[in-house]
Amino acid sequence: MRTAINHHAQGRFGLLPRLAATLSFCLAFLLFAAPADARNRDVSGHYERNAENDQASLDITMLPGDRVKVDGVALWNIKNEKYGPNLGELNFEAPLKDDTVTWHDPDGYSVTIHFSRKALDVTEHEVDGHFGHNVTFVGHYVRTKAKAGD
């Protein structure tokens, strides 16, 4: 009888370490499998987009009240030494909602920035003459620095 009790106790108490290990594994899996969205975190940083003949960068700074400050420069025709590149600039503050910032200029131009873990994607509603010829902020950007000033 003593053997049966010891075997029963080992079975019950041997289960707890295995259960704890399994729960730890499940928790780790959930943390790493979390959505790639930026929800509930600081999206501040320096982001860059580089292409063959154009490039752009955005400096994003978190502000109080779930707002962000956006400062950016975009260049087109960067290989043309004679006439130089065409330039566009962004500088605005807007609310961050569901990993997205949208800003509208009075001339009809609008920009939408969607944040993910270490990147962002920009879409625009373009207006002729808002920036230099062919200048755009549209595209996928990679965060190169965690904070814009770093």
Image (tube, rainbow, N blue to C red):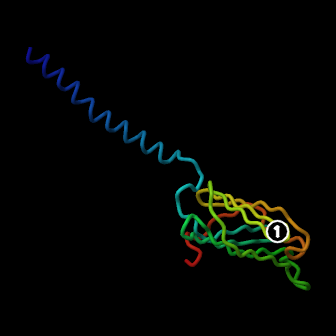
Residue 13 appears at what percent x and percent y? 21, 30
Q: Quadrant of the N terminus?
A: top left
| Camera-nearest residue between 131 and 142 | 131
Residue drawn where x is 13% and y is 22% of the image? 6
Q: Is residue 7 left or right of residue 32?
A: left
Question: Badge 1 is on which residue?
Answer: 136
Residue 15 appears at what percent x and percent y? 27, 29
Residue drawn where x is 14% and y is 16% of the image? 4
Residue drawn where x is 60% and y is 67% of the image? 67
Residue 111 appears at what percent x and percent y? 76, 64
Q: Quadrant of the C terminus?
A: bottom right
Q: Is residue 96 left or right of residue 41?
A: right
Disc 1, SS: loop
Is residue 101 shown above or below 69?
above
Q: Is residue 48 left or right of residue 136?
A: left
- Residue at the far top: name it: 1
Residue neighbourhood size for the residue with mark 1, other residues' Cα within 10 Å, grouped as few (<14), some (14–19), many (≥20):
many
Residue 18 appears at what percent x and percent y? 31, 33
Residue drawn where x is 71% and y is 59% of the image? 121
Q: Is residue 2 left or right of residue 90?
A: left
| Camera-nearest residue between 68 and 22 | 68
- Residue at the far bottom: name it: 82
What type is the residue that disc 1 sits on? Thr
